[in-house]
Amino acid sequence: MNREIIRFMLSRILLGSGLVLLLPLFLSFYYHGPVTAFLIPMALSVVLFFLLRARGISPYAGLTPREGTAITAITWLSVSLLYALPYALSGVLSPLDSIVESVSGLTGTGATVINDITVLPPSLLFFRAMTHWLGGLGIIVIFVALFPQAGRGTTKMVNAESTGPTNSKTLPRIKETARSLFIVYFVFTAACTAALMLWGMDFLDALDHAFSTIATGGFSTRNESIAYYHSASLELILVFFMVISSANFGMYVDTWKRGFHVILEDTEFKVYLAIVAISTVLIAASLALTSHIPLAESLRESLFQCASISSTTGFVSADFDRWPAFAKLMILLIMIAGGCGGSTAGGLKVIRLILLFKSFSAILKLHMHPKAVFHITVGRERFSQNTVFQVLAFFFIYMALSALWAACFMADGVAFMDALGVAFSTMSNTGPAFGQFGATCTYAALPDFSKVIACLSMLFGRLESVTLLSIFIPSFWRRGGW
């Protein structure tokens, strides 16, 4: 392993992450907010740039998959710590809570430890939402898209950060692909901001909510989240943008090149839409029959919550923790399922669920026809046996880690159902859970040890476990290789 190139690439990413803080810094000057809270981490990023870059290396040096994995994992850990500083230096949060808020923002979880966010200055509210936007598409993807010389072999870094198995190769060069993804991401954000401003939000509120929506994060500028506004039209706007952000962004790039029929032919997105629709109808029926809520209101509440939770955004317009047991079960299931592979959403991903179902079907057929040869296809895409094996392994790792986190929470004094909810919510990067940490609550009441575990769970969930697991294996760091 070439450790020098890891240091070199990390130095450039940290510098870029520090320069981004110029945006909230300008807002701090304008609104007389905390200036040093952003100046100090900016200065630290510059110092780290020169320290890590000291030995130097060619910007055109290539990367191996192992080096790409190491850079991605260390980048997320380092930027999470760097972006914790504005919270701590502004005096809003303790050091541990600052890390939780930073990790939650970057991973798109949206679980806050701030009980009253209305007291935060506009610059810090903007910074919170901005961390969603940077982490949503991916720190590495944005770095590759915007830096003129990201270096060769950055495909390994992007792959280590990407979410869900996908065979789509929309463009031949990774830098061109990253730029196209960024353009789509930027256009969606601008469109969402414009729609929210037309609805009546001021620019900064609209931009903050657009960051959270397109990145499927969930940080709001109101303690009550979207329930504060009591607006069906606002909820429909957000439902639309949350749903389109749950699709594979590569699909939109492909649509840009080949036409709208690409969306109509995308099996995974159609299955995702079916999941949202079926969940909405089932939950609405449950609310209407058992809670005696009018059908129109039941449909409105269930649609918004289903779009929000399935996309792992985590906005809430109603307290689903008060819903019937069946409705809460449906919420938990779509939370685990998540959005599509290649989207900003978390969870297992719909494509993996499709492959799991098809694998189960193939196993039954093999039992009846032992000599038969079956191929796993989704739409027009054929997935290799290696991909199917990785999906099965990921499903096991996801469930095993969720069980481990839940056990850690319970050992720290968290109630059983609350612990399960937080474990699956953080692994799926959703945010709201159940009980003490439900739709209208924060994570502030978590014990300190549980907050550390929650940070790990959010990072493992965002980087899909394997990337972070790899760096904890001693042999990973040996120069001889695996």
Image (cartoon, helix red, strand yellow):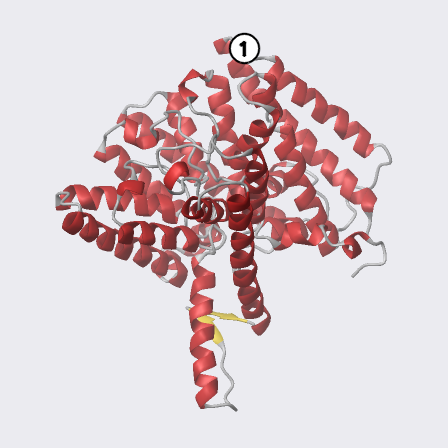
**Residue 237 visible in the picture:** yes
The number of numbered discs placed on residues in the rendered structure image is 1
Quarter of the view holding residue 387: bottom right
Q: Could you tell me the amino acid type at mark 1? A: Phe
Q: Nearer the viewer, residue 283 or 22?
A: 283
- Residue visible at 82% across and 49% down? 2
Residue drawn at (32%, 57%) of the image: 275
Residue closest to the far top: 32
- Identify whether 443 is placed above or below 273: above
Foreground of the two, 408 or 388: 408
Q: Residue at x 41, y 37 (%)?
A: 437
Q: Residues within 10 Å of mark 1 (few under 14, many from 20)?
A: few
Do we see residue 380 in this rendering?
Answer: no
Q: Residue at x 54, y 67 (%)?
A: 392
**Image position of 79 (left or right of 1):** left
Rendered location of residue 285, percent (x, y): 18, 53
x, y percent for residue 172: 60, 56
- Residue where numbered disc 1 is placed: 29
> SS of the residue at dot 1?
helix
Q: Tell me if residue 464 comes above or below residue 195 in the rendering.
A: below
For this view, does 11 lie left or right of residue 157? right
